[in-house]
Amino acid sequence: MSRETHPAAGAREPVVKVSCVRHTYPDRTQVHLCGLDFVVEQGQRAVILGPNGCGKSTLLFHILGLLEPQEGEVAVFGVNPARHFNRIRERVGVLLQDVDEQIIAPTVWDDVSFSPRSYGYRDAEVDRMVERALERVGIAHLRHKVCHYLSGGEKRKVALAGALVLEPELLALDEPFEGLDPASRADLVGLLNRLHDDQSVTLVIATHDVNVVKAMADVVYVLVRGGEIVAQGTPEEVFREPALLRSSNIEPPVLAELFQRLEELGVSLGRPLSIEEAARAVLEWGARRARPAAQTSEPTAGPAAGKERWPVQPSLPLDPTRGGGGGQER
Ligand SMILES: Nc1ncnc2c1ncn2[C@@H]1O[C@H](COP(=O)(O)OP(=O)(O)OP(=O)(O)O)[C@@H](O)[C@H]1O
Ligand SMILES: [Mg+2]
């Protein structure tokens, strides 16, 4: 890790801590971000999952000091962001869900250079920072484009370049994968993981895209309608019970559902969440099945012994409502 912000390991404050925040919007809609505390340690990658309207963006707005809670506490780098965001703003990069609110300058270069210019960096330094941010996000070819004419996915990448340009220690990203094609999505997962691996950047990401979670989360928080934070854990822990996710109106990753269904059908291969792990689990299972009966402790059955055998009839009716879509990263 190339960047250590707090010298004493073990005595570190979390980068983000949100405790039982209540917010009432002007039309009296209440969001109560309570239940579990939302805590993100330095260098952690935290993903927030939850259905539409549960309060993911509201949570991020509090972290960014754009909203002030009526109750509860928010601390980012040890300060209250609603009161003292100026003290930490150079350390925080932001991608809002509505990128049109974020893109303010006429051209891509103007927009991405806005922060370094307003912080008074010299022209040559601004050029270097902007070029690096554009290249990281893969949009150097768009530098002279008029933002208004960009596609939705391109706009999101411009906003992301603007978030990265000051090389922040904390990146708060609201639905960063929305509108991205599969290659761009995989590139973004790779970029965020490199920022984490090489620079120990702390990531807070709200997303509906459960299939990227395994590839890029250390910790997952699950919100339900009204804002309650009902679960926290590693992707493996949170996805172990797809039924729980469904009851929170979150589509479980397709692999989590597949391997749970196989378990129900008598084939227990663990709960792999990536294609590689799943392929390995299936191959190992196949190898175990193919081993001669004498070498395996599994029961044998007549003439099929030593060959691949399925413990259930292939014609067993499967529940068509359990199908999931979507791909899996890595
Ligand atoms: N400015 C506002 N005025 C009134 N109500 C609002 C406002 N902003 C958000 N809300 C309400 O607050 C609740 C939480 O909204 P929020 O945008 O945080 O949800 P979300 O989890 O980010 O949803 P999505 O997945 O659709 O992005 C919703 O019921 C929403 O209608
Ligand atoms: Mg939102």
Image (tube, rainbow, N blue to C red):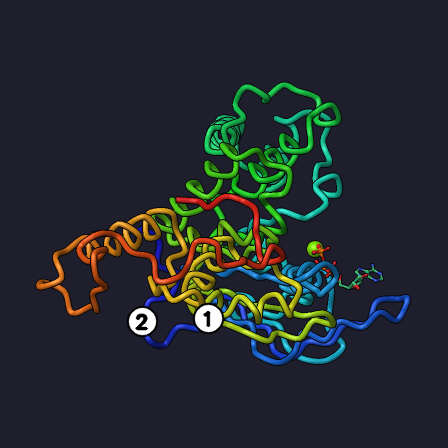
Residue at the (51%, 50%) spot, across then down: 211
Looking at the picture, tell me which residue is in the foreground, 154 or 93.
154
- Amino acid at pointer 1: Gly
Quarter of the C terminus within the rendering: top left
Q: Is residue 264 left or right of residue 73?
A: left
Residue at the (52%, 23%) spot, across then down: 140
Looking at the picture, tell me which residue is in the foreground, 312 or 56.
312
- Amino acid at pointer 2: Ala
What secondary structure is found at the residue carrying circle 2?
loop
Per the image, the residue denoted by label 2 is 9
Earlier sequence position, callout 2 versus callout 1 = 2
Residue at the (63%, 65%) spot, across then down: 81
Q: Is residue 210 visible?
A: yes
Q: Is residue 11 left or right of residue 34?
A: left
Q: Name the spot of residue 98 as percent of width and height, x first.
A: 72, 45
Q: Is residue 41 visible?
A: no
Per the image, the residue denoted by label 1 is 233
Q: Is residue 109 above or below residue 233?
A: above
Q: CA distance from mark 2 to mark 1?
A: 22 Å
Q: Name the spot of residue 260 as percent of width and height, x first.
A: 45, 64
